[in-house]
Amino acid sequence: MHTVKMNRNYVYVAIVLLVAIGFSLLLPMLRESVGGNYILGTETYYHLNNLNQPTQVYDTIINFLVSYFGEHNTIVYLPVILIFLSLLIFSNLFKHFLETDTEYFFALIILVLTPAFLSAHMGLTLASMILFLLVVTIFLYFKSSYFYLIFLALLYLFDPFIGFTLTVALFIREIVRKDYTGIVVLFLTLMILVITSLSTNIHTYFINPDLISFSANSIFAFFGGRYGITLFLLVLGIMGIIRTIKNYPAMVLSSFVIIGISLFYEPARLFGIVVLVLYSARALSNLVNREWEINYIGQLVLILFFCMLLFSSMTFVKSELQQEPRQDQIETLNFLKDLPLTNEAKVLIMPEEAEYTTYYTGRDVLASSYRTQEDVALALDLFSSRQYSFVKEVLQEKKIGFIVVDYDVFNFLQFGEEGLLFVMENNDNFVKVYQAKGTQIYFFKLWNE
Amino acid sequence: MKLKQTTVLLIVLLIFVLLAKLIVLSDIDSPAYDSYYGMRQVENIKSTGVPIVNDNLSYQGRTNTLDFFVYYILAFFSVFVPIKLLFLFGGVLVGLGSLVLIFLIARKLYANRWVALIVTVLGALSTVIFSSSLATLTSSSLFLLVYLGMIYAFISFSRNENQIVWFLILAVVGTLLSSLMLPLVLAFVIYFLLVKLENLKTRYKEVELVGFTGLFVIWYHLILYRSLFELHGSRVLWDSVPRELLSVFFQKLSLPLMVALIGVLPFILGLYAIYHSLFTQRRRYLLFVTSLALSFIGLLFMGFLPVLDGLLFTTVSFILLSGFAIKQLNAYFNKMNFARVKYFLVALLIVLSLVNFVPIIISGSQIQSPSIDETEFLESLSLPKDATIFANIQEGQFISYYAGEKTFYDERFTLAPQPQRRYEDAQTIFLSTSKTKTLSLLNYYDIHYVYLSQLTRSEYNVSTYLFENDPCFKLVGQSEQSQLYEVRCTLSK
């Protein structure tokens, strides 16, 4: 009986791992085949651009991997390895929190089909590394192995806030368990980490203010949040919490704290989603086993949830395949790259496109959505400005030689607005050097004055 | 088969309403302005099999929302009835169907045919309900039938399980028809909360049925508006309708006006029923109808509902609730020695309702619809390709339908490019006395023609001096009630 149960669990894990690896490996190939390129996610470009001047520990790791294994192998296989290892560890951890095989299977399947989890493992993302280190630390901690301290230290290096929060959480747990050795070890670890961090200036921030946001647009996937909560997780998660709170109030309270932090701090959001996955699995299992008053309503509800889960995954796949940069955009950027002008001339382009612009052209950009928000605001002001004096002053100050006007700019300006286009078309200091498929590139002659 | 007295009277009432509507419609030449988007969609479906998704004419080019189910239904009916007649008279059948359903619901709620009949009379004489489907057929007016059908199925299914299937079918149809399913879902949530607060037994059949419906409705709308949500996030819930329009509507919609529109009697009787259902009675289905009223009133005042739709469904809820007071009065008078006084009161009630109602028929409808003169004028226009016509916001789709030309803006704001900005600029064009300002906006938006109708003049008190006397505007066409001016000047940059 025990052997049968164990075998069934192995089968579940195997299925889930296959699905995960399938997504991770197939998507880059599919994307390449539909006329794009194998690189997924704009964050990947951001990290590739940072290879020569790493701004964070993650970039240093990527730099190391790229130098040994090559760029292509790193981009394709690192996410596969991370998703594989993360799922293996989750498959072990989930057993501690779930009661039945059905819940266990549902938790794994929901996790692997959740767009936020998949999105974090497409390309090079800091979130996937943080999640991996988080679960390894927790796994080793529950295994009573002191190796968890190593991963805890690594986690702290990658994200001091999450590392610190986890340390405090484990610290509290040790106090509750009255494990004085554990208390002392954790306290000393925390002190060492904090002092090392402060004295070596590894981190610019303890908590990056650009990653703090409490807006519906980033929390919920249906409002466009990249690591957002889907309707499926929201509804089932709430149902699962309501079912659990009576019997396990402490567990639910801890979950609220984790989910609460994840709502405010984006790198933690993925872990909040994993917690919701657990409750969703419990709720879904309950719905399956429930005695419905109206039988066919029960079947309809399950079909509906199944459709919701599948639909969100398919939508995610579709958006990944259609993500920028498209082939025509890469052609435009290659043209920009081949222009016989020093690389000092920066490019003004919409912030969402900045990182892959830098990657393909080798030119710096004014603003990227991954860097300072002040520059992003300045870039948007420039695009919507009709005042030549303001435009000239900023372009010269920031040494911007090229302005790329494409569909995203028109979308931003909306119908009838001309903004910077009005300035460029009515001033001889701007020369149109490229026009194709709705994209124009202007050269500003006075960029270096 | 001998018909019951109440059935006979109901039929008489329906005939009365039918005649009243036909009398009003006899003065109306064309469907109301809000019908023309639907007419364009139906025509396109009939000719190409698909609706207009990328609309080149509205807002000079925009994407339409994907709520086309209702137009496929109307396209089916337009095979048998000409489109114009369908939109002009189809609402009459919708209105009559609504009254029948109001009767059935009231009969179920109050277990008294006479009370149900009086409720139906109040509904028939309600100006809001009467006008709602007059000379127009929109998804909202069709949704009223679905809405009432769902209420009936919900209050009936505890005794007749077949009603569950009807409820589900209507829920799916309603979801495909209109986003007004969302307030209905909210009403169900309020209902379950009230049931809990009143310590009434939770019926799990209701929870299961409504749970599935609510989930389906919300999921469907998230899919339907996915691109809108991804582009604009949660702002789309508030920012679709230009702020000025919202504030104008709500300035006009004061409590006295709302009471007058719903009807003083239904409002007072409805309030009475709400009070008792919340504080003294523990009647499940009365709580349900109370939840409907609370949901629509709440969303209306928070600005989440179009005013006319919100008023319509609020009125229907109050009229259904008014049956409670009528039944109580009936029981009270039956105990008295002067039981016949109740007949006098019923007559008084009907007379008071008629006081509001009759002026609509005598003076003609307040439905804003174009005249034959205007439609013929627009049909006769022969303008250059890609010309844009600037007109009143209500006339946008009407002009696109008859003239086949681009228009500056109209009342379909969702997914429209910069509705707020365009509305503000349109006000400036209509009201500004500065030729430079007017011309600069007309040039900016590449507008070639300005259409001035009776409606525009009365709404804006627009002086035509600028257009009549300035060489920058040339009169290129006119009819008895409208003129078309060509914009001939361009301001240099």
Image (spheres, grey):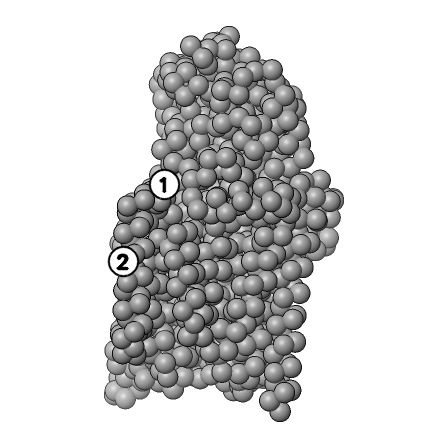
Q: From the top left corner, tell me how far across and down residue A446 is, in percent.
A: 46, 10
Q: Residue at x 40, y 69 (%)?
A: A146
Q: Please state which of residues B316 and B174 is positioned toward the viewer in this rendering.
A: B174
User: On the picture, is A30 further left or further right than A346?
Assistant: right
Q: Is residue A313 above or below residue B373?
A: below
Q: From the top left corner, tell me how far across and down residue B109 is, in percent.
A: 42, 79
Q: Chain of mark 1?
A: B
Q: Chain of mark 2?
A: A
Q: From the top left corner, tell me how far across and down residue B227 is, in percent.
A: 54, 47
Q: Amino acid at mark 1?
A: Arg
Q: Please state which of residues A63 and A164 is positioned toward the viewer in this rendering.
A: A63
Q: Please state which of residues B174 and B14 is positioned toward the viewer in this rendering.
A: B174
Q: Is residue B91 above or below residue A34?
A: below
Q: From the top left corner, tell me how far across and down residue B374 is, in percent.
A: 56, 32
Q: Residue at x 59, y 58 (%)?
A: A81
**Total tally of numbered discs in the picture:** 2
Q: Which mark is residue B203?
A: none
Q: Nearer the viewer, mark 1 or mark 2?
A: 2
- Quadrant of the snapshot with the C terminus of chain A: top left
CB within 8 Å, label 1 to label 2: no
Are discs 1 and 2 located on one and the same chain? no
Q: Amino acid at mark 2?
A: Met
Q: Residue at x 73, y 53 (%)?
A: B79
Query: Where does label 2 land, which residue?
Result: A191
Res B490 visible: no
Res A97 visible: yes
Q: Please state which of residues B386 and A284 is positioned toward the viewer in this rendering.
A: A284
Q: Which mark is residue B243?
A: 1
Name the secondary structure under disc 1: helix
